[in-house]
Image: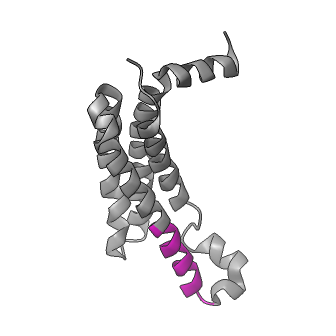
């Protein structure tokens, strides 16, 4: 069994749920580290810049717990993942607002998107949270 057939079988048997939980943990650590350095360059000028940095380790712990424990996968992981998704959406809005506040605002979009806060970067955080939510609703192997 190869390729997509093996993937579908892993989803059907519940093996993929544990892998996706672990991948959520890895993604949370990587994105939180990157966000820390990017927000540090901006001197954490807005207190909300700390939220994704703090939620990274929370997502990592929830992902590992979800990979190791069925109860955590169905309780702690979805709560942490939903919080991460909400923060990613909030970050997208805050970054869009930051672009609008640059000189020229959206009229000078090409320049302000390149030089302002990265408009789509917070959606990567949302993707990590989405993986955790997907892992929480998938069937788990027995």
Task: Tell me which segment is drawn in magenta.
Answer: 90-103
Left-right relation of 68 to 110? left
- Where does residue 21 sit, x and y in percent of width and height? 41, 34
> From the viewer's perspective, is residue 113 above or below residue 124?
below
- Where does residue 100 sit, x and y in percent of width and height? 58, 84
Q: Which residue lies at the image location 29% right of the left edge and 42% below the top edge?
A: 75
The residue furthest top is: 1
Q: Which residue lies at the image location 32% right of the left edge and 64% below the top edge?
A: 50
Q: Nearer the viewer, residue 44 or 23?
A: 23
Residue 97, magenta (yes or no) = yes
Q: Secondary structure of the magenta portion, mostly? A: helix
Render colour scheme: one colour
Question: The N terminus lies in which quarter of the figure?
Answer: top right
The quadrant in which residue 17 appears is top left
The quadrant in which residue 35 appears is bottom left
Left-right relation of 20 to 7? left
> From the viewer's perspective, is residue 45 above or below residue 54?
below
The residue furthest bottom is: 104
> From the viewer's perspective, is residue 51 above or below residue 102?
above
- Where does residue 81 sit, x and y in percent of width and height? 39, 49
Question: The C terminus lies in which quarter of the figure?
Answer: top left
Left-right relation of 122 to 51? right
Q: Nearer the viewer, residue 90 or 136?
A: 136
Q: Nearer the viewer, residue 22 or 95?
A: 22
Q: Which residue lies at the image location 38% right of the left edge and 64% below the top edge?
A: 40
- Where does residue 82 sit, x and y in percent of width and height? 40, 54
Q: Nearer the viewer, residue 118 or 42?
A: 118
> From the viewer's perspective, is residue 3 above or below residue 100?
above
Residue 32, magenta (yes or no) = no
């Amino acid at each position: 069994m190869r390729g997509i057939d093996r993937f579908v079988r892993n989803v059907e048997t519940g093996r993929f749920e544990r892998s996706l939980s672990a991948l959520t943990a890895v993604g949370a650590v990587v994105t939180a580290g990157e966000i820390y350095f990017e927000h540090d360059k901006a001197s954490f000028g807005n207190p909300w810049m700390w939220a994704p940095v703090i939620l990274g380790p929370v997502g990592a712990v929830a992902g590992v717990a979800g990979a190791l424990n069925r109860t955590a996968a169905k309780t702690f992981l979805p709560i942490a993942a939903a919080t991460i998704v909400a923060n990613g959406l909030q970050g997208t809005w805050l970054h869009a607002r930051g672009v609008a506040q640059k000189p020229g605002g959206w009229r000078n979009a090409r320049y302000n998107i390149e030089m302002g806060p990265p408009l789509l970067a917070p959606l990567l955080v949302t993707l990590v949270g989405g993986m955790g939510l997907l892992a929480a609703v998938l069937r788990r192997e027995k």
